[in-house]
Image (cartoon, coloured by chain):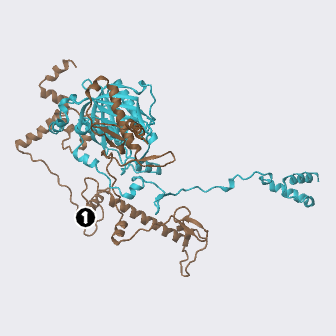
Chain colours: A cyan, B brown
C-alpha cells in the first residue's frame, strides 16, 4: 500500500486530481511486464502490442519475478504507483512456453486474468505496407459465435475491447479511422456447438483449454474507395502484427468485485448535452440552444503597438526640437512648417550654423 | 422512359457496400466494434487462412463503416464529426464511481433551512479607485481599513488604540475561524481510522480524556510521585499482571506446543513477506519461541535433535 500524499503545490494537486475516479473514465493504461524469463518471441509480441496500444502504454524494461496467478501483490502495487489498470505479463516457462497474461484491475485490485500462449506471430515490420498513425482509435472486429456463448471467449472479447478501445467517446472524425483489428477464432470444434457450450460451460468450468479454438489477431489498414453512394467501399491491407494465440489459464472476476465494477453513473440529460460528464469550462447553452463560449483575452499592451512609421514620431525627437527652438526662436517663426519633417531637418542645420 | 438500367446500376453500387450474412452483424458504434456471430467456415479456413480472415474482416469493416457513415454529424474546425451513440457493450470500470463530496456543516444547515447559496463575485467595484478590485487576497478590498491613511477614532478611545492593528486583528481572527471550521469539516468527513471504535459519543470521549490524563500524570521525571495532588484526584490504577496457570490440562498444553512446532516446520519467510506476516495478528513470536525451545542454540540445532542425528548424514550428501 502506498502512502497517501497530500499535495503541497498546485501541480501535484492537479496530478492527484487527474487520478481520482471519474464518471466517464479515460482509456486504461497498460503496463507491459516481463516475467523472470520472457523469451524472444514474447518480448517481440509485447513490443508489437505496445505499438498498437500507445500512448496509453508503459513498458517495464527489467525482468520481474511476478506470477499473476499466484501472487498479485506486485501488480496491485504497480497499478497504484503508475495509475494503470491493465497489465500484460510476458512469461515463458518449460510448462507454459511463450505465455502472455492479460490482467485487468479494478480499484487497484485484480479483477480478472486471462493467459494466452503465442503460437505464431508476424511483426509489423514484416509487412511492407503503410501503417496506421499511433494514437488513432482502431475499429474492432470479432468473428465467431463463441464470443457470445462461451464464457472464456466472452471474457477474452471484453478484455481485448478494454485493451484496444475501452474509452467512451461521443464523437469521432471519420477520416481518422485508419485501421481495424480483427480478432477471429479457428473453426469451432463439433463438441462445442452453440447448443452444447452453454450447458457445458455452466456445468464444468475447468475444461481443457487445449480443445478451445485458436485466436487469430490481425491488424489491417483500411482504404476507402468511392462507391457512388454515401458509404464508401472498404478495402483492407494487412498492417501487422498478426498473432495466433491459444487460451490457457484464466481467473474469472470475483462476483462482488464485478458487480461494483459494472456500476454505471447516473447521467443527467444536461450533462450529456454538455459533453458527457467531462468538465468543460466557460461553455454554456443559452435559451436558444446555441453553445456559447467565453474567451479570456489578456490585457493588450498598447504602448508597444506598431503604428505608421514617421520620422517625426521617433523617440528622442521632441527634446532636440525643443533645444533648437530655444536657441533661435526667430528662425522657427520664419519657417512656419513645424510639423514638416524636412523643415525640421533644415532648421537644425541652421541652428548649428548660428 | 425506362429507368431499369439506372436502378440496376444503383443496385450494383449498393451491392458493393452492403454485407449479406446469415446472421446479421452486431455493431456497437460507441466502441467502434463489430461482432460477427456467424460460424467459421472450416473449408475456406483450411484452404487459405489469411485470405479467409481478411475477407471476413473486410465484411465486418464494411458493415461498421456503413453504420458510422450513417450517423448524424456535426461540423468542427477539423472536418465533420460523427456523433456516436452510447456503447451497448458494458465494460467494467477501472475505478469505483466518484463519491459525492460530504456536505459541510453549513451546507447541512442551509439545506435544512432552505437557504440558497448566492455566489459572490471575486471582484468588487471600488468607487474611489473607479476600477474592479479583488474582494480578498492581493490588494483585496477587505484590507481597506488597514491601508487607508486616515481613520476615524471615537473620542473616548484608549490612548494606545491603534485602529489599523484592530482592523488587522479582526481580519486575521476571521481567517483563523474559517480555517478552524474547515478543519472541523474535514475531520467530520474523514472515515474513522480502523481499530478505533470511537463514535464521538460522550462516554468514548471521557475514556479518551482519562487515558490521556493517566499518561500525562506519569510523564514527569518522578513518574508523578512528587507531583502536587489536585483536590478530588483519585489514585491511578495500574495494570495487574496476569500469569498463565502453572497447571493446565494436557490437551491445551499439547495444542500450545504443537502450534510452536508447526511454526518451526514452515519454510523461513523471505524478507519481503516477513513484515506483512508479523503485522498480521501473530500471537506467537517465532524467533523467541525457537530460542527458548532450542535453549539458545538456534533452529538448525533443534532440527538436528528432532531428526535424531540425521543432520550429519545430510551434510555429507549432495547439495
Task: State the image coordinates of residue A184 (x, y, percent, origin top left).
Answer: 30, 32
Chain to which the residue tagged by mark 1 belongs: B
Please tell me in which quadrant of the rendered image residue A333 appears.
bottom right
Instruction: Answer yes or no: is residue A1 visible.
Output: yes
Quadrant in which the N terminus of chain B is drawn: top left
Is residue B164 rendered to the left or right of residue A166? right
Which quadrant of the view contains residue A41?
top left
Q: Where is residue A66 in the image (x, y as percent from the top left)?
A: 30, 33
Q: Which sits in the foreground, A330 or B202?
A: A330
SS at mark 1 in the image: loop
**B160 versus B284 height, above or below:** below
Residue at image position (42%, 66%) is: B177
Question: Residue B194, image x and y in percent?
Answer: 26, 53
Nearer to us in this view, A225 or A333: A225
User: Which one is in front, A146 or B277?
Assistant: A146
Residue corresponding to mark 1: B201
In the picture, residue A147 is in which quadrant?
top left
Q: Which residue, as the protein is rendered here, is positioned at the far left?
A: B250
* Left or right: residue A203 compared with residue A163: left
- Figure quadrant of the C terminus of chain B: top left
Residue at 29%, 59% in the rendered image: B212
The x, y position of residue B14, in whole percent, is 39, 38
Amino acid at each position: 500500500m502506498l502512502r497517501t500524499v497530500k499535495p503541497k503545490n498546485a501541480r501535484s494537486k492537479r496530478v492527484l486530481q487527474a487520478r481520482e475516479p471519474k464518471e466517464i473514465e479515460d482509456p486504461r493504461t497498460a503496463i507491459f511486464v516481463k516475467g523472470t524469463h520472457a523469451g524472444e518471441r514474447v518480448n517481440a509480441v509485447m513490443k508489437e502490442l505496445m505499438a498498437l496500444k500507445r500512448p496509453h502504454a508503459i513498458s517495464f524494461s527489467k525482468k520481474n519475478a511476478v506470477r499473476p496467478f499466484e501472487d498479485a501483490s506486485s501488480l496491485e502495487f504497480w497499478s497504484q504507483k503508475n495509475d494503470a489498470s491493465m497489465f500484460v505479463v510476458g512469461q515463458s516457462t518449460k510448462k507454459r512456453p511463450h505465455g502472455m497474461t492479460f490482467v485487468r484491475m479494478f480499484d487497484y485490485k485484480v479483477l480478472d486474468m486471462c493467459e494466452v500462449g503465442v503460437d505464431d506471430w508476424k511483426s509489423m515490420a514484416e509487412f511492407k505496407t503503410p501503417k496506421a498513425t499511433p494514437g488513432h482509435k482502431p475499429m474492432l472486429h470479432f468473428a465467431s459465435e463463441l464470443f457470445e456463448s462461451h464464457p472464456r471467449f466472452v471474457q477474452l472479447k471484453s478484455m481485448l475491447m478494454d485493451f484496444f478501445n475501452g474509452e467512451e467517446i461521443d464523437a469521432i472524425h471519420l477520416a481518422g479511422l485508419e485501421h481495424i483489428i480483427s480478432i477471429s477464432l479457428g473453426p469451432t470444434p463439433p463438441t462445442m456447438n452453440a447448443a452444447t457450450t452453454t450447458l457445458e460451460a455452466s456445468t464444468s468450468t475447468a475444461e481443457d483449454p487445449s480443445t478451445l479454438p485458436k485466436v487469430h489477431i490481425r491488424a489491417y489498414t483500411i482504404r476507402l474507395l468511392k462507391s457512388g453512394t454515401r458509404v464508401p467501399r472498404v478495402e483492407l491491407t494487412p498492417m501487422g502484427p498478426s498473432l495466433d494465440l491459444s487460451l490457457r489459464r484464466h481467473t474469472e472476476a470475483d462476483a462482488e468485485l464485478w458487480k461494483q465494477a459494472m456500476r454505471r453513473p447516473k447521467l443527467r440529460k444536461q450533462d450529456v448535452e454538455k459533453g458527457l460528464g467531462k468538465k468543460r469550462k466557460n461553455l454554456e447553452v443559452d435559451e436558444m440552444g446555441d453553445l456559447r463560449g467565453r474567451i479570456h483575452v489578456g490585457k493588450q499592451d498598447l504602448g508597444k503597438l506598431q503604428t505608421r512609421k514617421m520620422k517625426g514620431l521617433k523617440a528622442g525627437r521632441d527634446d532636440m526640437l525643443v533645444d533648437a527652438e530655444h536657441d533661435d526662436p526667430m528662425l522657427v517663426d520664419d519657417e512656419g512648417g513645424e510639423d514638416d519633417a524636412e523643415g525640421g531637418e533644415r532648421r537644425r542645420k541652421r541652428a548649428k550654423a548660428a | 422512359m425506362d429507368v431499369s438500367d439506372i436502378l440496376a446500376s444503383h443496385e450494383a453500387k449498393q451491392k458493393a457496400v452492403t454485407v449479406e450474412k446469415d446472421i446479421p452483424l452486431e455493431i456497437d458504434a460507441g466502441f467502434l466494434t463489430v461482432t460477427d456471430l456467424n460460424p467459421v467456415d472450416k473449408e475456406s479456413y483450411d484452404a487459405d487462412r489469411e485470405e479467409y480472415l481478411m475477407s471476413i474482416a473486410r465484411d465486418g469493416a464494411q458493415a461498421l463503416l456503413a453504420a458510422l457513415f450513417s450517423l448524424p454529424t456535426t461540423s468542427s474546425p477539423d472536418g465533420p464529426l460523427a456523433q456516436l451513440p452510447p456503447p451497448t457493450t458494458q465494460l467494467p470500470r477501472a475505478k469505483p464511481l466518484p463519491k459525492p463530496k460530504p456536505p459541510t456543516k453549513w451546507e447541512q444547515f442551509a439545506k435544512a433551512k432552505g437557504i440558497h447559496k448566492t455566489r459572490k463575485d471575486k471582484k468588487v467595484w471600488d468607487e474611489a479607485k473607479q476600477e474592479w478590485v479583488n474582494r480578498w487576497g492581493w490588494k483585496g478590498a477587505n484590507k481597506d481599513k488597514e491601508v487607508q491613511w486616515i481613520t476615524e477614532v471615537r473620542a473616548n478611545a484608549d490612548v494606545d488604540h491603534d485602529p489599523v492593528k484592530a482592523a488587522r486583528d479582526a481580519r486575521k481572527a476571521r481567517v483563523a475561524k474559517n480555517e478552524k471550521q474547515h478543519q472541523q469539516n474535514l475531520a467530520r468527513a474523514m472515515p474513522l481510522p480502523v481499530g478505533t471504535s470511537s463514535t464521538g459519543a460522550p462516554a468514548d470521549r471521557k475514556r479518551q480524556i482519562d487515558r490521556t490524563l493517566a499518561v500525562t500524570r506519569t510523564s514527569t521525571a518522578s513518574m508523578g510521585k512528587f507531583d502536587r495532588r489536585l483536590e478530588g484526584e483519585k489514585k491511578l490504577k495500574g495494570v495487574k499482571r496476569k500469569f498463565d496457570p502453572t497447571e493446565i490440562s494436557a490437551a491445551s498444553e499439547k495444542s500450545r506446543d504443537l502450534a510452536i512446532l508447526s511454526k518451526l516446520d514452515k519454510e523461513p519467510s523471505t524478507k519481503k513477506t516477513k513484515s506483512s506476516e508479523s503485522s498480521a495478528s501473530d500471537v506467537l513470536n517465532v524467533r523467541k519461541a525457537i530460542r527458548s525451545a532450542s535453549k539458545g542454540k538456534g533452529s538448525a540445532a533443534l532440527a538436528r535433535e528432532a531428526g535424531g542425528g540425521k543432520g550429519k548424514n545430510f551434510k555429507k550428501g549432495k547439495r
